[in-house]
Amino acid sequence: MTSGSFSQFGFSRVHSLTLRDPVQFTERFQALQRLIEKVTLQIGLNEVCETSIPGLSFYRIAELGTPTYCIYEPCVAIILQGTKEISFGEEACDFGQGAFFVTSVDIPTLARVTAANEQTPYLSVVLKLDFSLLNEVILTLEPPKQEMATEARGFVSGVATSEMLDAFARLATLIERPLEAGLMSGLIKREIYGRLLLSEAGDLLRSVTRDGYRDKGIVRAVEWLKYHYDKPLQVADLAERSGMASSTLHHRFRKLTGTSPIQYQKSLRLQAARSLMLTERIDVSTAALRVGYESVAQFSREYARRFGAPPSRDIKRAREK
């Protein structure tokens, strides 16, 4: 998907679904409103709500702000209200109401809410992917088959159907019903995965669960960086770990994550340092050294370029919110 704006309810020329079917439109609108009501009730005036349902989170933003860097874990996210522009590497996408996207690996992104206010805040729901459960659903829906090798992709987007929105609303309902949640949440997550497999995300989800996908090739390189971002990085060594030439690694890594291995490591380090300073209240020098920087001055320069202010000022501003 290229940069551009979704029209009302997430539709754009990219998607074949149109508003010409009034019954389909009405069902989708009603399902979307039910989910908005559930999320609004749970999140209140907070910006983030980590629910009691494992992997399920809600987000709310009531005012426009500067672009923020974040790293999306493998997940499915649906925009319920407002609009958001997200840059996955060099590809910028506008997500409107009812649009969804799925990420297959941890992807550094630059995100900016472009439509929100106190009366109609930006709202979204995010569900982390459980690859074991996803694989079970795939095997239930269809027998294993020999798949052609496809180049890994980091994300895919589409339009949430009324059935998908309804499943998310029922999952959100279980937050207030802990006894039912233990029994029913897994079943509803299976349904959500089934709906995703029938959507634009189906091919991507099948590819990321095939045998060996997460242990071989470029995904192995991403996973290594995720858990060793504080270690010195030699691209040649990373390529050898992944079983490919350095030039191939660069090409496939950028295709998957939208950035180079070096820039990916930098994103992980800066995000980790910011989290350490906010949660553990450690000083700038300690944070820089802990995430792998040898020079505190270099860390401060790169941090300011990424987050728009030097570390101390940014952390102070974040704590005052």
Image: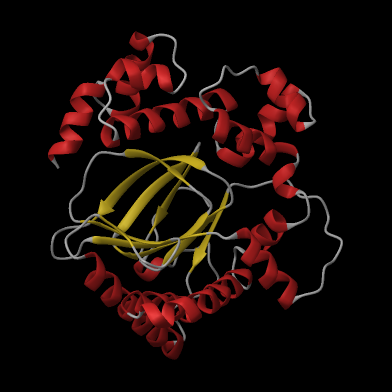
Between 288 and 25, the residue placed more toward the observer is 288
Q: Please, is residue 208 above or below residue 97 in the view?
A: above
The image quadrant where one finds the C terminus is top left
Q: How many marks?
A: 0
Between 8 and 156, the residue placed more toward the observer is 156
Residue most toward the front?
179
Whole-percent x, y for residue 225 in the image: 58, 31
Inspect this view and state whether residue 106 appears. yes
Inspect this view and state whether residue 4 appears. no
Whole-percent x, y for residue 220 in the image: 69, 38
Q: Residue at x 33, y 9 (%)?
A: 297
Whole-percent x, y for residue 142 in the image: 77, 75
Left or right of residue 317, residue 225 in this image: right
Q: Quadrant of residue 10?
A: bottom left
Between 52 and 41, the residue placed more toward the observer is 52
Left or right of residue 131, residue 145 in this image: right
Between 20 and 143, the residue placed more toward the observer is 143
Q: Residue at x 81, y 50 (%)?
A: 149
Whole-percent x, y for residue 299 in the image: 37, 16
Q: Please, is residue 317 above or below residue 237 in the view?
A: below
Q: Please, is residue 99 above or below residue 253 in the view?
A: below
Q: Residue at x 56, y 34 (%)?
A: 227
Colour mapping:
secondary structure
Left or right of residue 133, residue 176 in this image: left
Residue most toward the right?
146
